[in-house]
Image (spheres, rainbow, N blue to C red):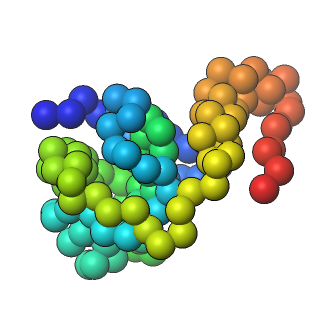
Amino acid sequence: MVPLHAQRCPGEPDRLRWITPPGMLPFTGTPGAVPEPLAALLTDGTLAEVRVEPAAVVTVLGADGDWRRDGPRVRSALHAALDDPAGWIPGAASASPDEPLRVATQALLDGRVGDFARSHGGMIQPSR
């Protein structure tokens, strides 16, 4: 079983970043298809989006989602999906060459660098 650690995305309560071993999946961006049972959570609206980062999978809850209620199902489905890396199909729009840099920057801002800025009343937003 792949080790997973859930990390909140500051200011985005509907998102969780599930930290995975780096390079677990061979692409970044929005997948065109994911293995079951993760696909079922997208189909039934539990999840609105799944995005692959170099060392994480970001999940976004659907409109009526609640992490306390749905979190265990999402974790179990993600574990099962990560045990089937061949079932992850890249989306039609491939990630830009700058995607790993964008993801690394966001991870810094979501972590200690952002915490430091927030502790002093500030905020850092990357340009999009």
Q: Residue at x 56, y 44 (%)?
A: 9
- Left or right, 56 with respect to 42, comes to right
Residue furthest toward the bottom?
44
Task: Please tell me which residue lies in front, 59 or 22.
Answer: 22
| Residue 94 drawn above or below residue 124 | below
Question: In what quadrant of the picture does the N terminus appear?
Answer: top left
Q: Residue at x 83, y 50 (%)?
A: 127
Q: Residue 91, how many percent across, how many down?
A: 44, 68
Question: In what quadrant of the picture does the C terminus appear?
Answer: bottom right
Task: Please tell me which residue lies in front, 102 or 60.
Answer: 102
Q: Residue 18, how many percent across, how many down?
A: 39, 41
| Residue 4 drawn above or below residue 127 | above
Task: Please tell me which residue lies in front, 125 or 53.
Answer: 53
- Left or right, 112 with respect to 88, comes to right
Q: Residue at x 60, y 40 (%)?
A: 100
Q: Residue 94, how many percent across, how many down?
A: 53, 62
Q: Residue 99, how many percent across, how many down?
A: 62, 47
Q: Is residue 46 visible?
A: no
- Left or right, 49 with respect to 68, comes to right
Q: Residue at x 27, y 63 (%)?
A: 34
The tally of labels here is: 0
Q: Is residue 88 visible?
A: yes
| Residue 118 drawn above or below residue 32 | above
